[in-house]
Amino acid sequence: MMGSDGEFRQPNADDRRPVFFFDVDNCLYSRSKRVHEMMQNLIDKYLMTHLSLTAEDAFRLHQTYYQQYGLALEGLVRHHRIDPIEYNAEVDDALPLEQVISPDPHLRALLLDLDRSRVRPWLFTNAYRSHGERVVRLLGVDDLFEGMTYCDYAAPSIVCKPHKAMFDRAQAEAGAPAPDRCYFVDDSYMNCRKAMELGWTAVHILEPDDPAPTSQAAQFQIRSLQELRHIFPHFFKKSKFGTA
């Protein structure tokens, strides 16, 4: 849980509760906010500026690295030795999030309804820490997660979802007892598929108007986080209406 100093507390090693991992971007808020598009534009701009690419070549390289590694930044660090902290400052931290993200009372109510005696909510993002913390603060839910596993741009090598090492790190950092005690919701097909392969219970969240994938990514598929109440009623507090 985030303390008064803004730092997430380390989990108790003796805590045997399952952990529910929440992705951040396009999961805690809708893709209709168009943060993804703004980020794509800033990434392409960064590539054009620092690698002297045309707009077309920047877009192509960006998509290639995303498909190959799950995060464009990983390819840029591997093949172009760019400074990931500088990249973060010019891309993620440059996003005008304050203009598009605001407190979400429905998300807050959902998270407050989680029964903390039965499950621990944890953030799990491919973004750097500053971006993840900024998003949950703007959404008004930064006090409702017990911790965050993020892509450490300052590390010697970049590790991100959907790589197994990233899921292993999340499980270890959150103190989850075993893979079958890990629950996960993400908008990425690749991430959900990998989580399921590793023994996690995964939930693929789609936008309301997204076409359903030909093959379902994971055990569950939803179009709103509110559906988690019905899939996992045992994780939510009881109310006079049944599950909260």
Image (spheres, rainbow, N blue to C red):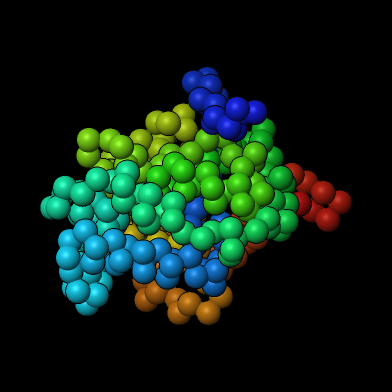
Q: Residue at x 56, y 75 (%)?
A: 208
In this rendering, position of residue 130 left or right of residue 45: right
Percent of width and height locating residue 52:
17, 65
The percent coordinates of residue 65 (x first, y second) are: 22, 61
What is the residue that sits farthest to the right in this orientation? 240
Q: Residue at x 63, y 53 (%)?
A: 139
In the displayed structure, 39 sits above or below 202; it is below
Residue 178 lies, with reference to residue 97, above or below; the image says above
For the residue pair 132 and 162, the one nearer the viewer reads as 132
Q: In this orientation, which residue lies closer to the viewer: 128 or 236?
A: 128
Q: Quadrant of the N terminus?
A: top right
Most foreground residue, 232 or 71: 71
**Residue at horizontal 66 percent and vertical 49 percent from the top:** 140
The percent coordinates of residue 170 (x first, y second) are 40, 38
Q: Nearer the viewer, residue 108 or 75?
A: 75
Instruction: Please say if 107 is above or below 10.
Output: below
- x and y percentages locating residue 138 in the rendered image: 61, 52
Decide if residue 58 is on the left or right side of residue 39: left
Residue 150 visible here: yes
Q: Total marks drawn? A: 0
**Residue 58 as seen in the image, left or right of residue 2:** left
Q: Is residue 158 above or below residue 242?
A: above
Q: Can I make out residue 197 in this image? A: no
Residue at the image point whose x is 72% and y is 47% from the top = 113
Q: Is residue 111 left or right of residue 74?
A: right
